[in-house]
Amino acid sequence: MQTITTTDALATFCKEAAGHPYVTVDTEFLRERTYYSRLCLVQLAMPGEGDENAVLVDPLADGLSLEPLYDLFRNESVVKVFHAARQDLEIFFVDQGVIPTPLFDTQVAAMVCGFGEQAGYETLVKRIAKQPLDKSSRFTDWSRRPLSDAQKAYALGDVTHLRKIYEFLASQLEKSGRDKWVAEEMAVLNDPATYVTEPQDAWQRIKTRNNSGKFLAIVRELARFREEYAQTRDIPRNRVFKDDALVELAATKPTSLQDLGRSRLLLREARKGDIAAGILEAVAVGQAVGPEDQPKPDTSRDKLQVNPAIADLLRVLLKGISDREGVASKLIATASDLDAIAAGERDVAALKGWRREVFGDEALRLCSGEIALRVKGSEIETVKV
């Protein structure tokens, strides 16, 4: 098991990898005590068998630069293969603004190829590579050195087995003509906005039952402060204060340290110093926001007049098409998509791109009464009316 610890060795590997059609990639990282993931290991493999053409790259090694790897990521003649790529890609984007292209995510491809709603790597290794997978090292501390042989073997397995998985899935997609479907799905992962958290938008992730403009203005300012504080100091946002404490603060509107001391949910560290000062300022700023600048929640879906009978028929249609096509139903359409279609909405993801081809057109015909559903044996079929 080769471990690369120098930039020259990494450059040599990446130069050779550039001559192959694809390279498999995985990472090991820690994020429990930081805002941004701390990259601890990169695994790479070129086409081959066993541990052949596979390496571990130690980004914690003194003097090692990942620039040769980023050059490979920018090389559009080499497909970069990941499994459940989003967190891996966020690491590289935050580090150097690099998103590997072209990109292939085997988890998405597996959902298109009939491996279930969210095919795990272990499942694909067993079903496609026909190999067992030892997951005992999964939750070890990847920042500690030296790495054990068990850790190295586990980490390397995440890219060596991935070669067979990729080759199988790519072949299946090409035969079925669904390779373009997966390419469409990669658009979200290739979009830099996927990996950027803007502090002014952080409030939209907060779940609250109170949708008044005054209340949400304070929520917005508290969430903005927390996000900026966490990003600047590279600590988890929940280490500043948790969501339930944020909602409590927006409701109680503290104006002094004494008020903060009465909070039931605020961490002790947040009742003093910079965090306390930031909270009080955020509450004051939020309270001063005029009606015209107060945030407004997206209530468009709340106003939808959903026809429950049509929504139920669409769910049956989706299940039938999912079974017939061997595509995970969750990937084709979400429950909110179905409700929106049943309410007459047409600007819906399920009615665009490959989803329209496989499901959307039939869904619209069902809504307009052009087709009906019938049961034939264990299958759901559509019939013209």
Image: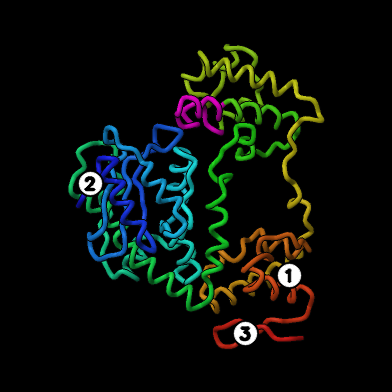
Q: Which residue lies furthest to the right in this view?
A: 292
What residue sits right under mark 3 in the picture? 375
The answer to whether 107 is drawn above or below residue 127 in the figure is above
- Classify residue 164 by image quadrant: bottom left
Magenta region, mostly helix, strand or loop? helix
Q: Residue 177 carries which label?
A: none
Q: How crowded is mark 3: few (under 14 residues within 10 Å), some or many (20 or more)?
A: few
First of labels 3, 1 by sequence position? 1
The answer to whether 320 is drawn above or below residue 86 in the figure is below
Three-letter residue code for mark 2: Thr
What residue sits right under mark 2 in the picture? 3
In this view, the residue in front, 25 or 315, is 25
Three-letter residue code for mark 1: Ile
The answer to whether 254 is drawn above or below residue 346 in the figure is above
In this view, the residue in front, 274 or 108, is 108
Three-letter residue code for mark 3: Val
Q: Position of residue 117 (x, y in %)?
A: 49, 64
Q: Is mark 1 on a helix, strand or loop?
A: helix
Q: Position of residue 198 (x, y in %)?
A: 60, 35
First of labels 1, 2 by sequence position? 2
CA distance for labels 3 and 1: 17 Å
- Classify residue 322 by image quadrant: bottom right
What residue sits right under mark 1 in the picture? 310
